[in-house]
Image (cartoon, rainbow, N blue to C red):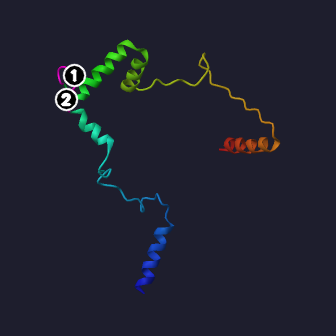
């Protein structure tokens, strides 16, 4: 009888969607440590003194100063710096006068026209 109860419980769990809250198992430890993880190695390296810097400052300071130096000389570096610091500029959708865009789609096949008409009809009904 105990086997029947277990089978019934397993059956219910199998019927749930794989991403349902009952099936999700959170990873509380985060990303598992690996023997070779380039991101971890790079993060550790950022705090070490830079051998190319005459003042022997950490890599993170050296790289940021070089980045700002390149941004002062090159417009592409400057744009990249601004996008990373301020976020990308949103391009508005619409015509130059502010009116909404009008999109026309030309369809040659009758079956496709009927399918598009059905979809538009359903969207209009909602």
Q: Which residues are magenta?
A: 48-56
Q: Position of residue 37 (x, y in %)?
A: 32, 45
Circle 1 Cα neighbour tier, 10 Å, few/some/many (<14 / 14–19 / ≥20): few
Residue 38 part of the magenta-drawn span: no
- Image-based side of 78 in relation to 93, left or right: left
Are discs 2 and 1 less than 8 Å apart at CB? yes
Q: Which mark is residue 89?
A: none
- Image-based side of 33 in relation to 87, left or right: left
Residue 2 drawn above or below residue 90: below
Which of the 4 image quarters holds residue 100?
top right
Residue 65 drawn above or below residue 18: above
Q: Nearer the viewer, residue 26 or 78?
A: 78
Main SS, magenta residues:
loop
Q: Which residue is mark 2?
A: 49
Residue 59 drawn above or below residue 32: above
Q: Residue furthest right?
A: 110
Q: Nearer the viewer, residue 92 or 42?
A: 42
Q: Position of residue 96 (x, y in %)?
A: 60, 16
* Residue shown at 48% from the left, 71% from the top: 12
Which of the 4 image quarters holds residue 64?
top left
Tag 2 secondary structure = loop
Q: How many marks?
A: 2
Circle 2 Cα neighbour tier, 10 Å, few/some/many (<14 / 14–19 / ≥20): some
Q: Residue furthest bottom?
A: 1
Residue 23 drawn above or below residue 115: below
Which of the 4 image quarters holds residue 117?
top right
Q: Nearer the viewer, residue 81 or 119?
A: 81
Q: Which residue is mark 1?
A: 53
């Amino acid at each position: 009888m105990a086997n029947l109860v277990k089978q019934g419980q397993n059956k219910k769990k199998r019927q749930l969607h794989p991403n349902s809250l009952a099936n999700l198992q959170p990873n509380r430890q985060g990303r598992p440590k690996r023997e070779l993880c380039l991101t971890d190695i790079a993060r550790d390296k950022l705090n070490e003194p830079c051998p190319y810097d005459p003042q022997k400052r950490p890599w993170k300071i050296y790289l940021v100063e070089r980045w700002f130096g390149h941004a002062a000389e090159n417009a592409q570096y400057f744009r990249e710096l601004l996008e990373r610091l301020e976020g990308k500029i949103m391009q508005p959708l619409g015509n130059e006068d502010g009116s909404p865009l009008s999109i026309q789609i030309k369809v040659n096949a009758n079956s496709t026209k009927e399918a598009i008409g059905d979809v538009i009809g359903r969207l209009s009904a909602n």
